[in-house]
Image (cartoon, rainbow, N blue to C red):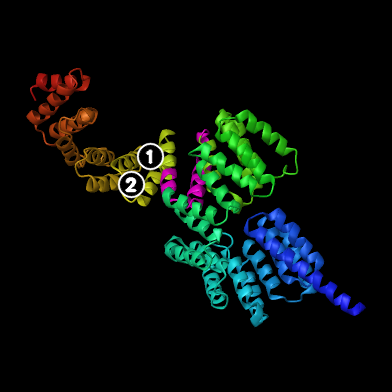
Amino acid sequence: MQRAICVVLTFVVINYSFCQLNEGKKFFYYERYKSAQAALEKAVKESAKNAEAFYWLALTDLAQDKTAEAKAVIQNGLSTNTNHPLLLVALGHVSVLEDKNAAAQEYFTKALAATGAADKAAVLTAIGRANAEGNSKQGNPKYGVDMLKAAAQTDAKNPDIYVLMGICYLKIGIDKGGEAVEAFSSAIKTDPAYAGAYYRMGRIYLAQNNTVFMDEYYGKAIKADPGFAPVYLSLFNYYKERDIQKAIEYLDLYIKNTDAECDTYIFQADYFIRTGKLKESLDKLKVIEKSICKDEPRIKLLYAYNYNKMGDSLAAKENIESFLAAAKKEKILAMDYKLAAEVYSKFPEEENKIAAFYQQYIDKDSSKLNKISAMQACASLFYKFKKYKPAGEWYQKLIDNKEKASSTDYYYCGMAYYYAADYNASSKIFKTYGEKYPADWRAPAGSARSAARTDSAMVTWAAAPYYEKTIMLAGTDPAANKLLVEAYKYLFAYEYNGKKNKPAALGYLDKILAIDPNNADAIKYKGMINGSGN
């Protein structure tokens, strides 16, 4: 009888452990990591043989940037579950995030060799999950796709497999967007109530600035599962720059459906900034700074936002520097680099850092429209600062990345190189400008200026045909008057000194005086020529 009771009690303990495991996995899916950790710690405490619980507890630590803790959890799990394939995959997962791709692959290979038929789908899925993590240089997303396809053959009704597959496709590159959409669609077909798949679809359209489809799929995610907090956070981040009333509604829903952690307090401080309540935001940050969240780097980021809006550039710069120094690189968002660029733009001497921050923003942001906007902002800023060489380079980058660069893009690019005294580069830009916009008189005018600088001794008179074309295209456009005077002066010198054609030379002086009757040079030269009789 005593033995029978022991067996029953053991079953209850094991059953309780697996109940906690399932609860922890559910919280992990909702990105409620504090709750997930509490449940999973209970699971491993109740049953040291529950290797899957150790695996998910390690993932929960990794999601909270607790790498050391995750490693300790894995080692504890291996002490009672020697060479368990899921825990070997967990070691590979850590290696991926530590940029140790070769070591990660060894762990995955070892895990597969140790996997039995019963665990095959779970292990293949775990390998896919590990390779879906991190940036494009971390792990092997193509290998991840292969593993997930194999997992789907064994466990075709698991929507998580298809979601991870879609993430791996996106990690491979933008050209795999179609395959990613197909994978997320498969997850939805497998389980129409799986909010995470709709959410991922919405994120694709968010990256494309397609608000209509973003709202559609985010709306479907909420309808499928109103408790899925990540969608509310994404909507808050999107609308906080566009519609603050919508943003606060989504923030309230996020806070309602997630664990109270540092992030929720920080989002509240962020909200105060967006509504212009800068004092309230600073007060909130000071409270957070004295709490258990005192080491959270994003506190410094929000201080930077605050001070930037208040016009205190030095304080903003100090705080953005502190944030960038303390935050893990993979946790720095595109918009954070954008703020850094804006803050540093108050300091023209920080030319290299401004360019670096704009480039990091461009590299991190997935929206082509946002990338183009950043290139435009950086190019315009350097032009304003009269830092013409980098201005030309950024305008060139803008032209190279736009589907169709405007005439203004070409003009400022060419003029930036011209003012930087890189006349070969300016000549090339103005030549292309003229080919793209043959009716625009600014193109041959730029070519003329570049040619004139290259032939400063006026030996070949290389600028003459360009100035003649400028005059032809400009016609009587008043906006071209200043440039026309410049063209007439050059052609006067060309006719008088180069071709020895006095009547033609005097004709150009008359054209100058028709635009500017008091032009001192034209009056002087006309008097000299007529007075000399030559």
Name the dominant secondary structure of the magenta segment: helix
Q: What residue is pinned by disc 1? A: 420
Residue pictured at 13% horizontal, 31% vertical: 496
Q: Residue furthest top?
A: 518
Compared across the picture, whether 259 is left or right of 317 comes to right
Residue type at the position of mark 1: Ala
Question: Residue 55 appears in which quarter of the rendering?
Answer: bottom right
Residue pictured at 44% horizontal, 64% vertical: 176
Q: Secondary structure at mark 1?
A: loop
Q: Is residue 170 above or below residue 211?
A: below
Distance, label 2 to label 1, CA atoms, is 10 Å
Residue 454, given in percent of the width and then of the height, sits at 28, 42
Q: Is residue 124 above or below residue 525?
A: below
Q: What residue is pinned by disc 2? A: 425
Compared across the picture, whether 482 is left or right of 300 comes to left
- Span highlighted in magenta in the image: 346-374
Q: Residues within 10 Å of mark 2 (few under 14, many from 20)?
A: many
Res. 155 visible in picture: yes
Question: Residue 303 appears in which quarter of the rendering?
Answer: top right
Q: Residues within 10 Å of mark 1 (few under 14, many from 20)?
A: some
